[in-house]
Image (tube, helix red, strand yellow):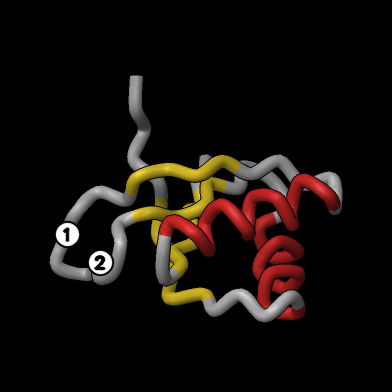
């Protein structure tokens, strides 16, 4: 199962993004992004379990700059 994580510029944008998505009825959670060679920036993103494409579009339309996407590691 896909576990998409949307990367943004800062923790501030991660929180704003979560709030925008909640207001539109999309579940979203701010999470720490694991440090890899691909990641840059603050190290936070938004985990969106469902409606990821819709979430990306809503955030873009709201002026949130998406810096990338990655799959979320399964944490037990």
Residue 47 visible, this orientation? yes
* Helix, strand or loop for disc 1: loop
Q: In this view, does 40 lie to the left or right of 8?
A: left
Residue 48 pos. (x, y %): 60, 48
Residue name at image x 30 percent, y 62 percent: 42
Q: How many labels does the image show?
A: 2
- Mark 1 closeness class: few <14, some 14–19, many ≥20 residues within 10 Å: few
Q: Hey, which quadrant is residue 44 in on the image?
A: bottom left
Note whether 55 is above or below 74 in the view shown.
below
In the image, farthest residue toward the left: 37
Residue 19 pos. (x, y %): 70, 50
Q: Do the residues labelled 1 and 2 touch (CB within 8 Å)?
A: yes
Q: Nearer the viewer, residue 14 or 55?
A: 14
Quadrant where the C terminus sits is: top left
Q: Nearer the viewer, residue 49 or 58?
A: 58
Disc 2 target residue: 39
Residue 32 pos. (x, y %): 34, 45
* Helix, strand or loop for disc 2: loop
Q: Is residue 14 left or right of residue 33?
A: right
- Mark 2 closeness class: few <14, some 14–19, many ≥20 residues within 10 Å: some
Residue name at image x 72 percent, y 73 percent: 57
Residue 2 visible, this orientation? no
The mark found on residue 36 in the picture is 1
Note whether 54 is above or below 35 in the view shown.
below
Cα distance between the residues tagged 1 and 2: 5 Å
Residue 39 pos. (x, y %): 25, 66
Q: Which of 2 and 36 is in front in this view?
A: 36
In the image, farthest residue toward the front: 12
In the image, farthest residue toward the top: 76
Residue name at image x 61 percent, y 75 percent: 64
């Amino acid at each position: 199962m896909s576990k998409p994580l949307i990367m943004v510029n800062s923790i501030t944008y991660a929180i704003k993004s979560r709030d925008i998505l909640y207001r539109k009825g999309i579940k979203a959670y701010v999470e720490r992004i694991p440090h890899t060679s691909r990641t840059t920036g603050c190290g936070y993103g938004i985990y969106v379990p469902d409606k990821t494409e819709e979430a990306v579009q809503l955030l873009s339309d709201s002026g949130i700059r998406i810096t990338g996407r990655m799959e979320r590691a399964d944490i037990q």
